[in-house]
Image (cartoon, grey):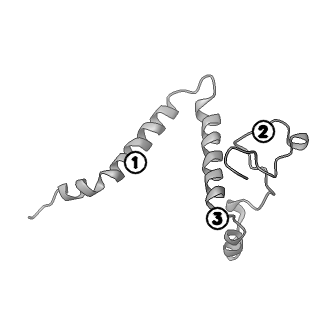
Amino acid sequence: MVFGELPKEYNPKIHGPYDPARYYGRPDIKFADVKLGELGAWFARRNKSPQAISSVIGRSWWRWQHKYWFPRKAGMAPFFQLMIGTMGVFYLLNYGSLKHHKNAKYH
């Protein structure tokens, strides 16, 4: 799959209209249902390519939008989530200059 194309697992005759928030690959055991002894095998079955990681991020973004942004009466939750996320990112970006300003009891 090249960026901008539909996944190769998607079949419009079977799946209907394309939904970017849905995974069209073969279903696997959910992470919550994996036992501790099977954890290594479960991680080994994952596709770790950059394209797969970007697909996971894109599906997560679309699921978040369908849950919080697109409903008619969405409320203030998406605005607060974006605001707190932005504050966290800028804190991490500026941490190098902020770590020297810690309060200390003794100098």
- In the rendered image, residue 59, in percent from the top left (x then y), is placed at 66, 46
Q: Secondary structure at mark 3?
A: loop
Residue 76: percent from the left, percent from the top?
50, 29
- Position of 29 with respect to 84 (left or right) is right
Asked if the residues shown at circle 2 and circle 3 are in contact, with their CB atoms under 8 angstroms apart, the answer is no
Hey, what amino acid is under mark 1?
Val
Most extreme residue toward the right, as rendered?
A: 13
Residue at position x 27%, y 57% from top? 96
**Quadrant hosting residue 14:** top right
Name the residue furthest top.
72
Say which label, 2 or 3, has the lower sequence index. Answer: 2
Quarter that holds the C terminus: bottom left
The residue that label 1 is drawn on is 89
Amino acid type at image mark 3: Lys
Residue 31 pos. (x, y %): 68, 61
> Going by the picture, which residue comes out furthest to the bottom?
37
Amino acid type indicated by mark 2:
Tyr
Q: Mark 3 Cα within 10 Å, few/some/many (few <14, many 20+)?
A: few
How far is the residue under mark 2 from the one under mark 1? 32 Å
What's the CA distance linking mark 2 and mark 3?
Answer: 24 Å
**Residue picked out by circle 3:** 48
Which mark is on residue 78? Answer: none
Q: Residue at x 47, y 38 (%)?
A: 82
Q: Quadrant of residue 106?
A: bottom left
Q: Nearer the viewer, residue 73 or 49?
A: 49
Discs 2, 1 touching: Cβ within 8 Å: no
Whichever of callouts 2 and 1 sits on the residue coming sooner in the sequence is: 2
Q: Nearer the viewer, mark 2 or mark 1?
A: 2
C-alpha distance separating marks 3 and 1: 24 Å
Q: Nearer the viewer, residue 52 or 36?
A: 52
Q: Which residue is tagged 2? A: 18
